[in-house]
Image (spheres, rainbow, N blue to C red):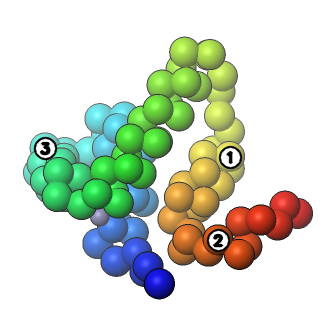
Amino acid sequence: MTFTIPDTCRELIAQLSAFLDGELDDTLCTKIEQHLAECPYCHTVADTVQTMLALYRHAQVTVPPQVHAHLLEILNREPNPQQDERVS
Ligand SMILES: [Zn+2]
């Protein structure tokens, strides 16, 4: 079974943190909200990112931009169970 993340989802995920921070304009927000409502994958990713952001804020931890980018990169990565076992 293969699962490829569609380009629309990749674009959305790239904008997700700005969306959750309320930095996007209304038109874009509506577009993202609509997509999240109908795409289970993006819904899960948005949920995860939102939880992470809430945790960071709650703990008053400042996340360096490169860490944040890395987290998004992990979320954006093609699922590959074989590689997930390896920790470098
Ligand atoms: Zn999606």
Residue to which mark 2 is pinned: 81
Q: Name the residue furthest front.
A: 1
Quadrant in the picture for residue 62: top right
Q: CA distance from mark 1 to mark 2?
A: 23 Å
Q: Which residue shows up at 12% across the image and 48% down it?
A: 30
Q: Which residue shows up at 64% across the image and 71% down it?
A: 81
Earlier in the chain: of badge 2 and badge 3, it is 3
**What's the residue type where badge 3 is placed?**
Asp
Q: Is residue 41 above or below residue 55?
A: below
- 3 vs 88, left or right, is left
Residue to which mark 1 is pinned: 67
Image spot of residue 87 (x, y percent): 84, 61
Which quadrant contains ligand 1?
bottom left
Q: Which residue shows up at 23% across the image and 52% down it?
A: 36
**What's the residue type where badge 2 is placed?**
Pro
Q: Which residue shows up at 60% across the image and 60% down it?
A: 74
Residue to which mark 3 is pinned: 26
Foreground mark, 1 or 3, reads 1
Image spot of residue 80 (x, y percent): 62, 74
Earlier in the chain: of badge 1 and badge 3, it is 3
Q: CA distance from mark 2 to mark 3?
A: 37 Å
Earlier in the chain: of badge 1 and badge 2, it is 1
Q: CA distance from mark 1 to mark 3?
A: 28 Å
Give residue 56's mark. none
Q: Secondary structure at mark 3?
A: helix
Comparing 47 with 86, the one in front is: 86
Quadrant in the picture for residue 24: top left
Residue 60 in view of the camera = yes
